Image (cartoon, rainbow, N blue to C red):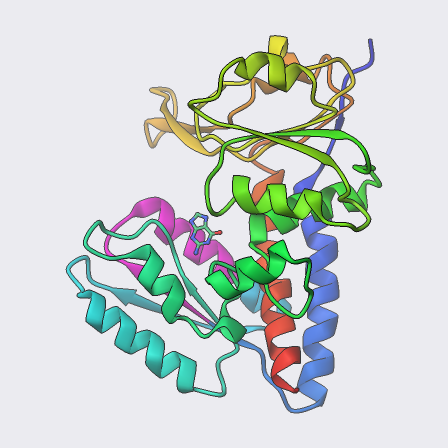
Amino acid sequence: MEEAQLLDGRLVAEEIHKETREAVQRLRRKGILPCVVFIRVGNHPPSELYVRMKQKKAQEVGIQSEVIALPEDVTQQEVLESLDRLNQDPSIHGILVQLPLPKHLSEKKIALAIDPRKDIDGFHPLNLGKMLLGEKDCFYPCTPLGIQELLKRYQIETEGKEVVILGRSNIVGKPLAALFLQKSKYANATVTVVHSLSQNIKEHCQKADILVAALGKAHFVTKDFVKPKAVVVDVGVSRIADPSSPQGFKIAGDVDFAEIKKIASWITPNPGGVGPMTIAMLLANTVKAAELSLG
Ligand code: GUN
């Protein structure tokens, strides 16, 4: 049997960055300089890396960016005050608070405090609610949006298909289910969301035409979970011990790529699949915020 073809997130993300760069140039000609602010709290090496990657890409496409690094012991009040100042500043179009946050801070209250018009992560309840209703003048979370866009660019139809999502997080599983349920192209799917308390997890997965693994459990999905010719999307990012690497760890996805690529029709590499798409959609959302600010 032929091996699966790659859903190359790096390649597609570069295509999207090119389109974003063009949109930024159009805005600049109208006198708008799209600008995003990233807030990072404390010392969390993966978050530092993600924010650096986002900032580098923003610069490449011509979006102005600033990082606010707050100390680990910053109070909730101080974070809310920073957000208030950024909400009021008309030169700032997008605000992102990198997750996870230290335990004493409330992700819920912080998501609520961001002006929904600047919420490029799409985590504000107003944006999540609008997404559920299928509205367009709002922001959808970047990872679900990136997964849908990746399928779209490879013309992988989802209409009427069995989509099984592993994981029910607020930032991937739940919003992705809502997105695939929409009455629109590259949606219109039959969606099942499977989670840690589900019974017969493997049997659900075996029915999937499109299987999305977003659990954060390294190599949880083995080939016996996958129907031949299924499309497999690996969202997971876990650090696992690797004494042979200089850092002592390596990144592992939720999917056993080497085995599953022998039976799937399409598969995302990881890294190089969903991750770059998330950043591409974040910058596309930033441009959308700047465009919507024109009224
Ligand atoms: N941490 C992991 N994924 C994300 C994301 O999409 N946005 C933010 N703000 N933090 C994250």
Q: Is residue 132 above or below residue 4?
A: below
User: Going by the picture, which residue comes out furthest to the bottom?
Assistant: 31
Question: At which x and y percent is residue 25?
Answer: 71, 79
Q: Nearer the viewer, residue 107 or 39?
A: 107
Q: Of residues 22 and 156, which is closer to you in this image?
A: 156
Q: Residue furthest front?
A: 133
In x, y percent, where is residue 199? Answer: 49, 16
| Residue range of the region highlighted in magenta in the rendering | 37-56
Main SS class of the magenta portion in the image: helix
Residue at left offset 34%, top offset 64%: 110
In the rendered structure, the answer to whether residue 151 lies left or right of residue 283 reads right
Q: Is residue 90 visible?
A: yes
User: Where residue 100 appears, x then y in whole percent?
Assistant: 33, 49
Looking at the image, the residue that sits furthest to the left is 73
Residue at image x 36%, y 27%? Answer: 249
Number of labelled discs?
Answer: 0
184 vs 241, left or right, is right
